[in-house]
């Protein structure tokens, strides 16, 4: 069975790459928000421990 006859791989990879480029920007925004949130919790815990 020849897979290249069933699947149009160039079209598949072009579409996959386009979806990846489109989603990557949104993923980076989500990752940045999570990272900032984790950083803030660490800073808040350090400030609380420093005061007590």
Image (spheres, rainbow, N blue to C red):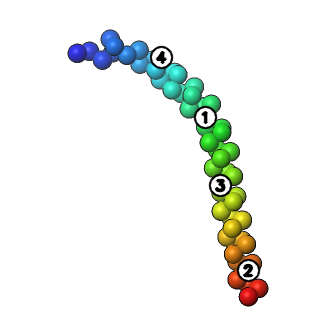
Would you name the residue on which mark 3 appears? 34
Choose the circle earlier in sequence order: 1 or 3: 1
Percent across and percent down for residue 18 are: 57, 25
Query: Which quarter of the image is occupied by the C terminus?
Result: bottom right
Question: Residue drawn at (30%, 17%), measured in percent from left and top?
Answer: 3
Checking the image for residue 11, the label placed there is: 4
Checking the image for residue 50, the label placed there is: none
Mark 1: secondary structure = helix
Mark 3: secondary structure = helix
Question: Residue drawn at (75%, 78%), measured in percent from left and top?
Answer: 47
Q: Residue furthest top?
A: 5
Choose the circle earlier in sequence order: 4 or 3: 4
Asked where in the image residue 29 lies, by quadrant, the reply is top right
Checking the image for residue 23, the label placed there is: 1
Q: Who is closer to the viewer here, 38 or 14? A: 38
Marks 3 and 2 sit apart, C-alpha to C-alpha, by: 21 Å
Question: Residue drawn at (41%, 19%), measured in percent from left and top?
Answer: 9
Label 3: few (<14), some or many (≥20) within 10 Å?
Answer: few
Marks 1 and 4 sit apart, C-alpha to C-alpha, by: 18 Å
Asked where in the image residue 51 lies, by quadrant, the reply is bottom right
Q: Is residue 39 left or right of residue 17?
A: right
Choose the circle earlier in sequence order: 1 or 4: 4
Percent across and percent down for residue 20 are: 56, 32
Judged by depth in the image, the label closer to the viewer, 1 or 4, is 1
Judged by depth in the image, the label closer to the viewer, 4 or 2, is 2
Marks 4 and 2 sit apart, C-alpha to C-alpha, by: 55 Å
Q: Is residue 21 left or right of residue 41?
A: left
Mark 4: secondary structure = helix
């Amino acid at each position: 069975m020849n897979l290249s006859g069933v699947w149009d791989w160039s079209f598949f990879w072009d579409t996959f790459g386009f979806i990846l480029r489109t989603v990557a920007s949104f993923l980076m925004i989500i990752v940045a928000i999570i990272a900032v949130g984790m950083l803030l919790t660490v800073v808040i815990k350090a400030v609380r421990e420093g005061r007590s």
